[in-house]
Image (spheres, rainbow, N blue to C red):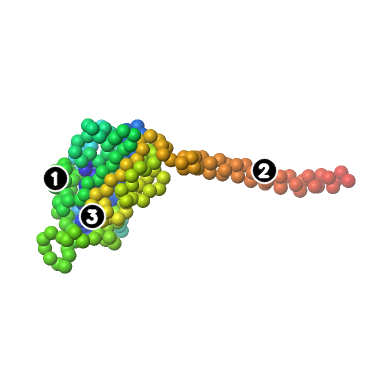
Amino acid sequence: MRPVLVAASCLTLSACTAHMDMTISSQGSYDVAMEMRDTTGTVFPKDKTPDCSAYSDPTALGVPAGTTVKAEPITGDDGLGCSVSIKGVKVPQASAAEPNTIVVRDGDVYKVTIQPLSPDPSQDSGGADGAAGAAPQASAPPSGGQDGPQPESTSFKGVVDTKVAVTFPGAVTQSGGGKVSGTTVTWDDPDTVAKGVSASGYAQDSRGMSWWSRSRIWLIAGLAALGGVLTVAVLRRRARGPSTSKGHASEE
């Protein structure tokens, strides 16, 4: 799936936002919500509304026909860009997957692999057409004003707002250096994402999760409901108190 390549290409800009949230279903598919913003005018010209049509074509994005894709322009002080929603991408078995497939199922787990960022997005799998080729002119920030290949020490920290989050049906089994919260693993270091990241998690809902992790939402909801009932009971008792006292007084 090529949208990840577009998000990765933002890392080569001097001021950019690249956020991607992937949610994998136990039913064998995944959804992606992605936000890309550019404040440099390199990818999205500043003088007009962003053209996001390239990101609304399943073929151009490299996802199977029938996948629901929606792309909308976004504006604001954080830069112009595109918001892309991709729903229902089928997950192949690892043994039958094509090279560089982002999500595969391998036995009881899903494996997610986001390839390292190449200097030229058009050199990544999928060619220069479609979404992957939307930003072929993007280049790494200059170092010392010199032309030519940039040193490996080039860092994007502080100049690129990056977040890649993957949510599995069950517990995360391999985080790839990301931060784990529940069934979600997140990378927010642009240098790490640029080098490629990978993670895996159980394909079955709630598998590998502790009893508390699986039940805490329902327990909290139940306690909140019980608290509400008790509060109502106390208020009603207080409301009845004065009238009851007056009734006893009149009888005397």
Q: Secondary structure at mark 2?
A: helix
Residue to which mark 2 is pinned: 233
Residue to which mark 3 is pinned: 11
- Furthest-bottom residue in this view: 144
**110 up-or-down from 118: above or below:** above
Gap in angstroms between the C-alphas marked 2 and 3: 58 Å
Residue at (64%, 44%) from the top-left corner?
230
Task: Name the residue nearer the viewer: 201 or 8.
Answer: 201
Report x, y in % for residue 54.
Answer: 20, 43
The reply to whether residue 190 is visible in this rendering is: yes
**92 up-or-down from 127: above or below:** above
Q: In which quarter of the view is residue 144 placed?
A: bottom left
Image side of residue 26 versus residue 18, left or right: right
- Any mark on residue 157, and which? none
* Mark found first going from the N terminus, 3 or 1: 3
Residue to which mark 1 is pinned: 128
Tell me the amino acid under the disc marked 1: Ala
Report x, y in % for residue 198.
Answer: 28, 45
Give yes or no for contact between labels 2 and 3 (Cβ–Cβ under 8 Å): no
* Mark found first going from the N terminus, 2 or 1: 1
The reply to whether residue 72 is visible in this rendering is: no
